[in-house]
Amino acid sequence: MAVPDLTPAKIVAILAFCETRTPQAWVEQACARVPELLLDHANCELKAASTAIGFLYRYPERSRLAERMSRLAREELRHFEQVKKLLQECGVPYARLSASRYAATLRQAVRPGEPDRLLDTLITGAIIEARSCERFAALIPHLPTELAGFYAGLLASEARHFEEYLGFAKSETGVDDRTIADRIAELKSIESALITDPDPQFRFHSGAPFPELP
Ligand SMILES: [Fe+2]
Ligand SMILES: [Fe+2]
């Protein structure tokens, strides 16, 4: 199945934002380990819902942000339920996998104190959403039809989330555009290394697989 032609400009924008591409060796690994891919993907959707809820706790006075994050949390929970249903249909029992280095490393890069914390959390959210889209796009041509179709649907949804996080980084923090652009570049460089550096663990957001020993 081809990458969905939902909005070619949007896909181009996401790929440009990500800068680095998912290594082909990761795509091959993912196609050979679909049950783990789906299990970790389910966890990622749950985590995305929990991140959105975190904004409600931390910034209740920001009504536009809180309103959108509340809807986003529900949408991510629906994704979680959809992936869980797919796991059930594939006969894969649901289990929690250990977290990957990806989200933990990005979380460590978030600065304490405001508005830095809000800005970094929103930028990190945009980066994770954009990377998820880039991974879906990389996987879709190589997956069985049903799973490819499911991921094509999610790609459209996560592409919206990426834009919304970036929009809030600009509208909610009061930080000037130049400073925001610099911080996006810093956080993207941390993220790119997590995607392209060798990673001993396979997860939805893991890095390049270690080469097999001869
Ligand atoms: Fe999602
Ligand atoms: Fe999302």
Image (spheres, helix red, strand yellow):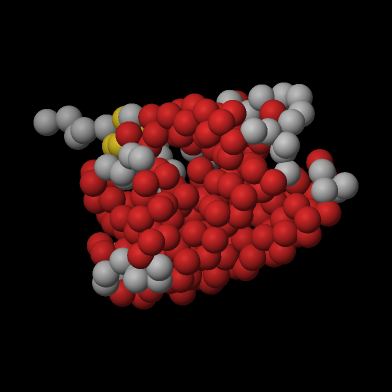
**Residue drawn where x is 81% and y is 41% of the image:** 58
- In this rendered view, identify the residue nearer to me: 41 or 136: 136
Q: Dividing the image into 4 quarters, which one contains the N terminus?
A: bottom left
**Spot occupied by residue 8 in the image (x, y as percentages of width and height):** 35, 65
Which quadrant of the structure image shows residue 151? bottom left
Position above or below: 18 against 111: below
Q: Residue furthest left?
A: 214
**Residue drawn where x is 76% and y is 24% of the image:** 113
Would residue 42 be seen by someone viewing this image from the given angle?
no
Position above or below: 57 against 45: above
- In this rendered view, identify the residue nearer to me: 38 or 45: 45
- In this rendered view, identify the residue nearer to me: 5 or 205: 5
**Spot occupied by residue 137 in the image (x, y as percentages of width and height):** 35, 59
Position above or below: 188 against 91: above
**Spot occupied by residue 44 in the image (x, y as percentages of width and height):** 55, 51
Position above or below: 78 against 201: below
Instruction: Left or right? Give the position of 45 relative to 90.
Output: right
Would residue 176 be seen by someone viewing this image from the given angle?
yes
Instruction: Left or right? Give the position of 201 relative to 85.
Output: left
Which quadrant of the structure image shows residue 31? bottom left
